[in-house]
Amino acid sequence: MSRALGALGALVLLLALLAGCTSGQADDAAPTPASSDLDQLDTALSPCPEQPDQPAAHSDLPATVFDCFGGGTLDLSRAPGVPTVVNLWASWCPPCREELPLVQQLADVAGDRVRVLGVASLDGASQTASFAGDAGVTFPSAFDGDGEVMAALGINNLPYTLFLAADGSVAYIQVGRIASLEEFEQLVADHLGVQL
């Protein structure tokens, strides 16, 4: 009897682990493109905004510069200058596909009060651009084809949302899908002190 319960427990644990999107699903993604290749993609994604020339407060984010689909770069070693929500996503991740339109709604509602950025992680550039277009996403997104941010944070599943203070410090990390615009707005109010 205890052996059957142990096997059942192992099966439940395995199913729980498989419920999220793990980085292993990106193995079929296209190779990482050169930054000039991002400029060649037909995408409605906005360019990444300029960042102040001020170092970010200490965090576990990699001090790496990523090219953005619409132009510009995202430098995680620099302070954003305004409260910022950074959503890590990929085209191969079903919960990301559900959440990404909500991230766009947040970007639309936030205006200049909160910056909303994406980081397409462990994905192919053409798949990312195609999915963003299909989902009607226009908020700026950087390309992290090698998954450097995920590796630095020690995560292997998506979606993952970072709430950054204006100085670049991590105020909060949401693991897993956010289910509604109202939930996003509440997280922004609670952790970034901004009412939307």
Image (cartoon, rainbow, N blue to C red):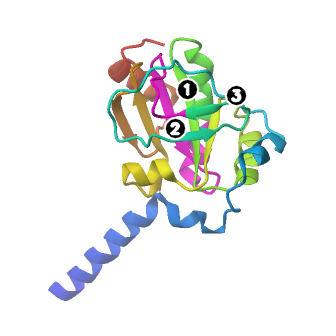
Q: Between marks 1 and 2, how big is the CA–CA gap?
A: 8 Å
In the rendered image, residue 108, in percent from the top left (x then y), is placed at 63, 20
In the image, taking residue 90 as reference, residue 186 lies left or right, namely: left
From the viewer's side, name the closer residue of 25 and 176. Answer: 25
Query: Could you say which disc has been placed on residue 47 in the image?
Result: 3
Q: Which residues are magenta?
A: 75-100
Q: What type is the residue that disc 2 sits on? A: Asn
Circles 1 and 2, Cβ within 8 Å, touching? The answer is yes
Q: What type is the residue that disc 1 sits on? A: Val
Q: Which residue is mark 2?
A: 87
Q: Which residue is mark 1?
A: 116
**Disc 1 on helix, strand or loop?**
strand
In the rendered image, residue 79, in percent from the top left (x then y), is placed at 45, 23
Q: Residue at x 28, y 78 (%)?
A: 8
Residue 1 in sight in this render: no
**Disc 2 on helix, strand or loop?**
strand
10 Å crowding of disc 3: few (<14), some (14-19), many (20+): many
